[in-house]
């Protein structure tokens, strides 16, 4: 894999992984918002422009800008008509805010397992699932994996369930020629501080259903929009959206290179799978650290060694396997959700925009650390 790095290099390289990256167009957008006074408006030209941009990008008619992706999930559920005492299907491995969004409505999560190759809700687990109280299913695209939306949507239609598509980690991804986030009845984006489109905070809810959109507007109206995105946030998002496709392509290329460079570690690292005819997006890139699937402490040891070198790795979600029956219903065992909650290793996305040599240098240190652990 090339020359062995020195001990001093990791912190030097890691310090360059800044996010968000410096951007003159963002600076100009902020200056323009100051000059025209829109920075102090409740709703103005930048919000309207962002809505139009998102409508075009995702081929949807209705957009609601909001304060976060998390509140976006709750608004989406309310838009779909989910009420107290209803049930909502959710993967056993997912972002914790999605579980809480269901609870915020007074509904109850119904947990199903994930596909261990994609980290996403397993469509096979929906086939036999029934229940008069089930009203919706939340489907998240995580860590570069893409859920089987054609099958999930078809199954949901048969049963009368609404589909909320969480695309917060994958803005710009494409599945079977269709933008991720436009497959469900409602889609959700996040503009949080670490996200690929960032305004520090914020989100958007996308739908082609006028009734869903109207329900969200009614719930959010407290004399004004109770969960707003500011004009300044909209201003900085628009130039980022223009660069999203190019940056996503660079990230995909880096992931392919990193996978090739770490292929000899396949006994210990199992990378996430994506279809060759899809265009995933990598907010974080996931492996399952195989030894940790049976010995969770192995992942903690690995992460400690990587952190000592200041390398940009982290863990996945804790998942919901241990949640009590008081808070949720489990549709069978959740072995893959449990496994991934203790074995997932994530590479943070800023490295994917770094120079090729810097990105591949990370694989040297990952290789060295793993070889030391298992030798």
Image (cartoon, rainbow, N blue to C red):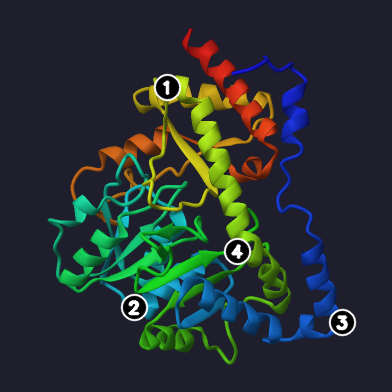
* Residue 35's disc number: 3
Mark sitting earlier along the chain (4/3): 3
Residue 227 image position (x, y, % from top left):
57, 77
Residue at x 46% of width, y 25% of height: 263
Mark sitting earlier along the chain (1/2): 2
Q: Which residue is mark 4?
A: 191
| Residue 228 seen anywhere in this rendered image of the structure | no
Residue at x 40% of width, y 57% of height: 140
Residue nearest the observer in this picture, 59 or 19: 59
Disc 1 and disc 3 in contact, CB within 8 angstroms: no
**Camera-nearest label, 4 or 3:** 3
Q: CA distance from mark 1 to mark 3?
A: 55 Å
Mark sitting earlier along the chain (4/2): 2
Mark sitting earlier along the chain (2/3): 3
- Please give left or right for residue 63 compared with residue 295 in the image: right
Q: CA distance from mark 4 to mark 1?
A: 34 Å
SS state under label 2 = loop
Residue at x 72% of width, y 26% of height: 10
| Residue 354 seen anywhere in this rendered image of the structure | yes
Disc 4 and disc 3 in contact, CB within 8 angstroms: no
Residue 196 image position (x, y, % from top left):
60, 56
- Can you name the residue that lies furthest to the bottom here? 223
* Residue 80's disc number: 2
Mark sitting earlier along the chain (4/1): 4
**Camera-nearest label, 1 or 2:** 1
- Please give left or right for residue 207 compared with residue 238 in the image: left
* Residue 268's disc number: 1
Q: CA distance from mark 2 to mark 3?
A: 40 Å
Residue 281 image position (x, y, % from top left):
50, 52
Residue 249 image position (x, y, % from top left):
57, 51
Q: CA distance from mark 4 to mark 3?
A: 24 Å
Q: Tell me the quadrant of the picture where the N terminus can be found.
A: top right
């Amino acid at each position: 894999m090339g020359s062995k790095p020195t001990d001093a290099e990791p912190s030097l390289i890691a310090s360059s992984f800044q996010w968000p990256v410096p951007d003159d167009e963002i600076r100009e957008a902020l200056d323009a918002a100051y000059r025209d006074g829109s920075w102090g408006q409740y709703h103005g030209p930048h919000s309207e422009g962002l809505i139009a941009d998102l409508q075009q990008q995702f081929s949807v008619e209705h957009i609601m800008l909001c304060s976060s992706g998390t509140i976006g999930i709750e608004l989406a559920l309310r838009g779909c008509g989910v009420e107290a005492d209803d049930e909502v299907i959710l993967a056993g491995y997912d972002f914790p805010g999605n579980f809480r969004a269901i609870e915020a409505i007074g509904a109850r999560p119904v947990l199903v397992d994930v596909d261990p190759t994609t980290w996403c809700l397993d469509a096979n687990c929906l086939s036999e699932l029934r229940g008069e109280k089930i009203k919706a299913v939340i489907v998240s695209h995580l860590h570069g994996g893409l859920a089987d939306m054609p099958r999930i949507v078809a199954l949901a239609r048969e049963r009368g369930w609404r589909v909320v598509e969480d695309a917060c980690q994958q803005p710009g991804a494409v599945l079977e020629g269709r933008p991720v986030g436009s497959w469900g009845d409602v889609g959700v984006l996040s503009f949080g501080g670490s996200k690929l489109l960032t305004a520090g905070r914020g989100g958007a809810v996308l739908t082609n259903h006028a009734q869903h959109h109207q329900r969200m507007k009614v719930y959010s109206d407290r004399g004004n929009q109770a969960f707003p995105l500011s004009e300044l946030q909209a201003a900085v998002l628009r130039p980022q959206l223009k660069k999203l496709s190019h940056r996503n392509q660079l990230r995909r290329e880096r992931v392919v290179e990193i996978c090739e460079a770490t292929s000899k570690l396949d006994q210990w690292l199992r990378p996430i799978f994506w279809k060759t005819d899809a265009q995933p997006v990598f907010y974080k890139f996931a492996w399952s650290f195989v030894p940790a699937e049976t010995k969770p402490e192995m992942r903690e040891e690995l992460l400690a060694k990587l952190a000592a070198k200041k390398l940009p790795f982290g863990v996945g979600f804790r998942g919901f396997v241990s949640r009590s029956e008081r808070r949720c219903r489990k549709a069978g065992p959740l072995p893959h959700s449990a496994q991934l909650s203790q074995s997932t290793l994530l590479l943070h996305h800023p490295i994917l925009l770094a120079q090729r040599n810097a990105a591949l240098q990370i694989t040297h240190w990952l290789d060295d650390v793993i070889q030391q652990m298992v030798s």
